[in-house]
Image (spheres, rainbow, N blue to C red):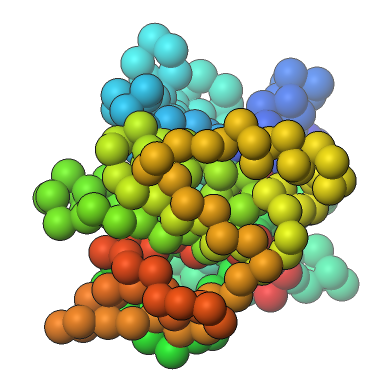
C-alpha cells in the first residue's frame, strides 16, 4: 500500500516538499492542508509590485505559462491533493492523525508521515493606536493589495517604515520609486542590523542618500498618532514623524501554536 504524507502549510516549504516528494515517489498519496486561501505564492517579489517593476499580483501565484497554481492545478499537473481553508488544530501522534477545521466542521486525517511547514506571522507592535487604519504588516498577499490600494487612492504622501531589515529596506526603495516621502525608523544603530557589521552598514547608509528618504537610527516607535481614526504619524522617543501609511516590519514569529 502507498504511504500517505500529510503536509501542513501550502506556501513555499510545503508545496516545494510536496513537489519534490512526488518526483521521488510516484505512488505516495500527498495531501497538503493550508488554512489560508492561496497556495504556493512567491512573497519575495511583493516589494517589486509596490515599486511597479512587477505589473500584476498574478505574477506571484501563476506559472510562467499563465496557469493559476491552485488546488486544480496541483491535482492535475502534480498529482498532489492540496486543500485550502483547512486549519490544522491538533496532532495526535499516538493515532498518527491530524484534526483540522474545514468550513466550520472538525475533521480528521490519518498520516504515515507528517510534515510541518507552517511558516511564520509578522510581529505586531503593542503600541497605542496600533490597530488604526493605515498601519500594515507586509507579509500576506492581502497586505500588499491593501498598501497598493491606499497609495493608488492618492491620500498617501508620507510613509514610515518601522524596521530596517530586508523587508523594510526593499519597501523603502519601492516607496521612493513611487514618489513617496519615506522615513525608516530603526531602534538599533545601523541598517540591516541582523546582517551587517558597523563598517559595512556605514557604506550602505552612504549609498541610501535620497531627498525622498529619511533614516532615523537609534530611535524607537512609542505610539501612533491618529486623526479621524486613521494614522497620522509615528511618535518616537525624539519626535513625531508624519505618515498617512505605516509599515511595521519588525520581524516574524513561527506559527507553532
Ligand atoms: C515581502 C517579503 C519579501 C521576502 N523576500 C525574500 C527574499 O528576497 N528571499 C528569501 O529567501 N525570502 C524572502 N522572503 C521570505 C519568504 O517568503 C519566506 O521565508 C517563505 O514564504 C517561508 O515559506 P514557508 O513555507 O516556510 O512559510 P509561509 O510562507 O509562512 O507558509 C506557511 C503556511 O502555513 C500555513 N499554516 C500555518 N499554520 C497552519 C495550520 N495550523 N494549518 C494549516 N495551515 C497552516 C500558513 O497559512 C501559511 O500559508 C520574503 C517575504 C516577504 C513577506
Q: What is the number of callouts on the image?
A: 0
Where does the N terminus fall, quadrant-wise?
top right
x and y percentages locating residue 97 in the rendered image: 73, 64
On screen, residue 218 above or below 165: below
Where does the C terminus fall, quadrant-wise?
bottom right
Residue 179 lies left or right of residue 254; in this view the side is: left
Nearer-the-camera pick, 190 or 249:
190
Nearer-the-camera pick, 150 or 117:
150
| Residue drawn at x 33%, y 49% as measured from the top left | 181
Instruction: Tell me where residue 28 sits by quadrant.
Output: top right
On screen, residue 86 above or below 112: below
Determine if residue 182 is in view.
yes
Determine if residue 107 is in view.
no
Nearer-the-camera pick, 92 or 129:
129
Residue 84 lies left or right of residue 156; in this view the side is: right
x and y percentages locating residue 232 in the rendered image: 27, 73
x and y percentages locating residue 223 in the rendered image: 46, 84
| Residue drawn at x 40%, y 50% as measured from the top left | 182
Instruction: Tell me where residue 163 sits by quadrant.
Output: bottom right
Nearer-the-camera pick, 69 or 110:
69
Residue 204 lies left or right of residue 210; in this view the side is: right
- Which residue is at the far top? 65
x and y percentages locating residue 25 in the rendered image: 78, 24
- Which residue is at the far bottom? 128
| Residue drawn at x 64%, y 61% as measured from the top left | 217
On screen, residue 120 above or below 51: below
Instruction: Tell me where residue 250 sits by quadrant.
Output: bottom right
Residue 150 lies left or right of residue 44; in this view the side is: left
Amino acid at each position: 500500500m502507498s504511504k500517505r504524507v500529510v503536509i501542513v502549510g501550502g506556501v513555499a516549504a510545503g508545496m516545494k516538499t510536496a513537489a519534490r516528494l512526488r518526483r521521488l515517489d510516484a505512488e505516495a498519496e500527498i495531501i497538503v492542508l493550508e488554512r489560508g486561501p492561496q497556495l504556493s505564492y512567491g512573497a519575495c517579489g511583493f516589494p517589486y509590485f509596490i515599486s511597479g517593476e512587477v505589473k500584476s499580483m498574478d505574477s506571484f501565484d501563476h506559472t510562467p505559462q499563465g496557469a493559476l497554481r491552485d488546488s486544480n492545478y496541483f491535482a492535475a499537473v502534480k498529482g498532489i491533493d492540496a486543500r485550502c481553508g483547512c486549519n490544522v488544530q491538533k496532532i495526535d501522534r499516538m493515532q498518527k492523525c491530524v484534526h483540522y477545521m474545514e468550513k466550520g466542521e472538525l475533521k480528521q486525517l490519518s498520516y504515515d508521515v507528517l510534515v510541518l511547514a507552517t511558516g511564520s506571522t509578522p510581529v505586531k507592535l503593542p503600541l497605542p493606536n496600533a490597530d488604526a487604519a493605515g498601519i500594515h504588516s507586509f507579509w500576506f498577499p492581502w497586505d500588499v493589495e491593501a498598501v497598493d490600494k491606499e497609495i493608488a487612492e492618492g491620500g498617501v504622501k508620507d510613509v514610515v517604515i518601522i524596521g530596517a531589515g530586508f523587508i523594510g529596506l526593499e519597501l523603502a526603495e519601492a516607496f521612493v520609486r513611487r514618489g513617496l516621502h519615506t522615513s525608516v525608523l530603526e531602534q538599533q544603530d545601523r541598517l540591516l542590523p541582523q546582517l551587517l557589521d558597523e563598517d559595512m552598514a556605514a557604506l550602505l547608509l552612504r549609498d541610501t542618500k535620497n531627498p525622498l528618504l529619511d533614516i532615523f537610527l537609534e530611535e524607537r516607535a512609542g505610539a501612533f498618532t491618529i486623526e479621524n481614526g486613521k494614522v497620522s504619524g509615528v511618535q518616537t522617543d525624539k519626535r513625531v514623524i508624519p505618515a498617512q501609511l505605516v509599515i511595521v516590519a519588525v520581524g516574524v514569529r513561527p506559527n507553532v501554536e
